[in-house]
Image: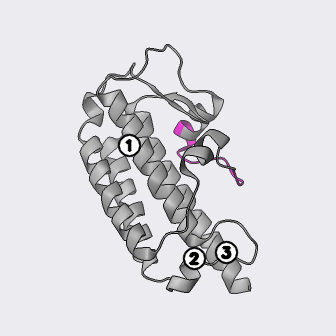
Amino acid sequence: MNLTKERRAIDTALDTYRRQLDTFTDERFTQTPPMGGWSYTEVYDHILKASLNSAIALECCTNNTCPPTKKGMNFWGHYVMFMGSFPPGKFKVPRSVSEKISPKKSDKEDIKNLIIKTRKKIELVAAMVNDAPKNARWAHPRLGMLNAPQWFKFIRVHLQHHLKQLERIKNNFAKG
């Protein structure tokens, strides 16, 4: 895994989220799409909070403060790491995650601040990934036990996945 490439891709994705944020009216940002599902603000809230939580898991790996385990990734973990993306289709947030960080409707200013906070956390943990012990792993709700480089890659995969969701929402509003 090329961590420099992953970092650039994370930064590019966060740049895209920030740039797109300015294209939404306040009303459209919080409006539920005609097809139903999450609004733009709920996607932003989810992806940024999930990225922060993933960075915290990564940090636990780098500090080796994870509970000891010999377990590794499950089938889906191997799939996502090998393919560098989620499988095609839509996925529901695991119940264990939705109970902790269900997406909320926030205003654009709150989201801008969350993007800044996420960038700072990514910058902090990115510098630590190379030195993280490979056997320190933290549980992901769908992918199994991930080590620090795998968490870093997951952040990138997840950010890019939800950019596609924003495009689907945009297309749905265009169809009316």
As drawn, the label of residue 55 is 1
Q: Which is nearer the eye, 33 or 20?
A: 33
Q: Which residue is mark 2?
A: 30
Image quadrant holding the C terminus, namely bottom right
Q: Give the image quarter of residue 135.
A: top left
Q: Give the image quarter of residue 104.
A: bottom right
Between discs 1 and 3, the one toward the N terminus: 3
Q: Secondary structure at mark 3?
A: loop
On screen, 147 above or below 122? above
Q: Which is nearer the eye, 5 or 60?
A: 60
Residue 169 image point, x, y percent: 64, 73
Q: Is residue 54 visible?
A: yes
Disc 1 residue type (three-letter): Ala
Residue 134 image point, x, y percent: 37, 22
Residue 13 relative to residue 96: left or right: left
Q: Which residue is mark 3?
A: 32
Q: Which residues are magenta?
A: 81-91
